[in-house]
Image (cartoon, rainbow, N blue to C red):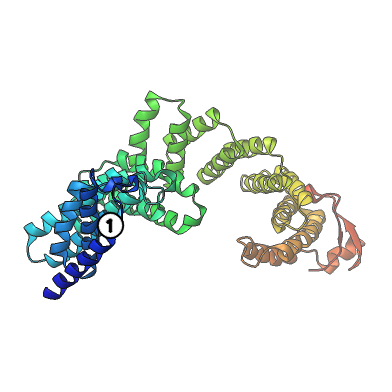
């Protein structure tokens, strides 16, 4: 301690010498006090504060801190930076005294409040930065005060706006979800509302994909986004405002993420499409109704989407979906027609060939006789093309290979070809079903 006092005395002497050459009446020193004498004293105390912090004499540093905050709080942001350092060290040293520790924590948070009051307009470390740091201190030092944590983080996010640190958003929302699960302080409505309010912050920051995943995971694990909760929440709201586009959009997005399949969900989705028709929503509805087994409605929305789509690549994808839905619903002619259009738009996509081959195979089974057997040649050729083009990990690859074997087993025998005056390797034009008119090669079973 004597050494520290000696150093401070030496610093005081040095400062006194330097001060004699300075004119503290200069307006640039105005933030340090009303008179030259006050300014000189406060600048000296600021130097002593730095020295005390550097020497970890936090009791002495606290004395100079109080002097500076009482007399010239606007003078330097470093007063508050060092103030935070002082009280964080005091908190660490007061582990065995809960009451004293609480006093120090309150002092630390007051330091942030005062810094925000006097330096909230700092160009780089203004309110957004200060309140962000304060929120993290509240979480660290007052983990049991859930309301204080939520309040501090909300203030930080409000100050930061769309530039809020994604880590801060995740910290707040994760704690909010924990409070919903573990206390009765947070309602489902509040969690859902905050999820909807904060999600756009990640859209404005593409580099925050990892934090967005954590954000979504917290929401999913909270249990608030159950179909039952969502339906209860949105039913009342939509009854009051049935044409509210933003409300409909939020309801559809959340219920689709929760994989709801109730009548209320489908009614809401269709209502949203009626209020704001779009290709994206039509595709979403088509998939939803396809999953439900309502192929007529799935096909309706796919065709509506196709009607307004201008990008050939997107048109091709829609046609593939239309072909698959028609195939599942056993509308073979429609499936074949859509698949051919999709194939013509992108001859390198294996899925249209897969659908066409299935259509030819179904037609072959329906035709009967030699004409039906011969149709399996076209089905085999088309499925072979699908296998050639499909990616190895495609969901259609395994059924495509199985179908190849099944089609080959349905080829005509050599005797049947002989009686129909056909020779192996010769050309044959299919006369039956959706493959009618296709030229193929004669092969024996």
Residue 21 is left or right of residue 38, and the answer is: right
Residue 322 in the image: above or below residue 355: above
Nearest the viewer among 197 and 310 is: 197
Which residue lies at the image location 70% right of the left edge and 53% below the top edge? Answer: 355
Residue 125 in the image: above or below residue 377: above
Which residue lies at the image location 75% right of the left edge and 58% below the top edge? Answer: 348
In which quadrant is the N terminus drawn?
bottom left
Residue most extreme to the front: 21
* Rendered location of residue 219, percent (x, y): 36, 50
Q: Is residue 64 visible?
A: yes
Residue 91 is left or right of residue 330, and the answer is: left
* Secondary structure under the numbered disc 1 in the rendered image: helix
* Rendered location of residue 218, percent (x, y): 35, 53
In which quadrant is the C terminus drawn?
bottom right
Nearest the viewer among 126 and 164 is: 126
Which residue lies at the image location 42% right of the left edge and 39% below the top edge? Answer: 262
Q: Is residue 110 visible?
A: no
Structural crowding at the residue carrying mark 1, measured as other residues with C-alpha within 10 Å and reported as few (<14), some (14–19) or many (≥20)? few
Residue 3 is left or right of residue 287, and the answer is: left
Nearest the viewer among 153 and 324 is: 153
Nearest the viewer among 289 and 358 is: 289
Residue 361 figure quarter: bottom right
Q: Which residue is mark 1?
A: 81
């Amino acid at each position: 301690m004597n050494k520290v006092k000696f150093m401070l005395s030496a610093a005081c002497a040095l400062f006194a010498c330097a001060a004699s050459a300075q004119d503290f009446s200069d307006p640039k020193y105005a933030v340090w006090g009303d008179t030259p004498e006050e300014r000189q004293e406060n600048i000296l105390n600021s130097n002593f504060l730095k020295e005390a912090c550097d020497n970890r004499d936090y009791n002495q540093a606290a004395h100079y801190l109080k002097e500076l905050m009482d007399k010239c709080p606007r003078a330097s942001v470093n007063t508050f930076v060092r103030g935070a350092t002082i009280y964080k060290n005091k908190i660490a040293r007061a582990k065995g005294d809960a009451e004293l520790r609480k006093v120090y924590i309150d002092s630390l948070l007051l330091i942030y409040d005062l810094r925000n009051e006097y330096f909230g307009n700092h160009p780089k470390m203004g309110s957004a930065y200060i309140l962000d740091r304060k929120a993290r201190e509240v979480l660290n030092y007052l983990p049991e005060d859930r309301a204080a944590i939520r309040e501090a983080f909300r203030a930080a996010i409000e100050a930061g706006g769309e530039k809020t640190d994604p880590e801060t958003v995740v910290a707040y929302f994760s704690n909010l979800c924990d409070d919903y699960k573990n206390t009765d302080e947070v309602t489902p409505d509040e969690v859902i509302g905050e999820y909807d309010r904060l999600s756009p912050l990640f859209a404005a920051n593409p580099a925050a994909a990892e934090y967005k995943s954590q954000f979504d995971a917290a929401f999913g694990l909270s249990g608030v986004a159950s179909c039952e909760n969502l339906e209860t929440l949105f039913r009342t709201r939509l009854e009051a405002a049935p044409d509210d586009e933003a409300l409909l959009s939020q309801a559809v997005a959340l219920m689709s993420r929760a994989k709801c399949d109730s009548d209320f969900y489908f009614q809401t989705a269709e209502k949203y499409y009626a209020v704001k028709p779009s290709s994206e929503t039509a595709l979403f509805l088509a998939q939803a109704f396809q999953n439900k087994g309502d192929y007529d409605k799935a096909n309706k929305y796919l065709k509506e989407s196709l009607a307004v789509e201008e990008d050939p690549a997107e048109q091709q994808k829609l046609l593939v979906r239309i072909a698959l839905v028609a195939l599942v619903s056993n509308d073979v002619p429609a499936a074949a027609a859509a698949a051919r259009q999709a194939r013509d738009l992108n001859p390198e996509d294996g899925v249209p060939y897969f659908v066409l081959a299935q259509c030819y195979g179904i037609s072959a089974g329906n035709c009967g006789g030699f004409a039906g057997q011969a149709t399996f040649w076209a089905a085999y050729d088309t499925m072979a093309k699908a296998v050639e083009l499909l990616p190895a990990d495609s969901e259609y690859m395994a059924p495509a290979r199985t179908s190849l074997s099944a089609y080959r087993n349905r080829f005509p025998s050599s005797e049947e070809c002989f009686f129909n005056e056909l020779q192996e390797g010769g050309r044959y034009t299919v006369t039956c079903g959706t493959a009618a008119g296709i030229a193929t090669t004669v092969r024996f079973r």
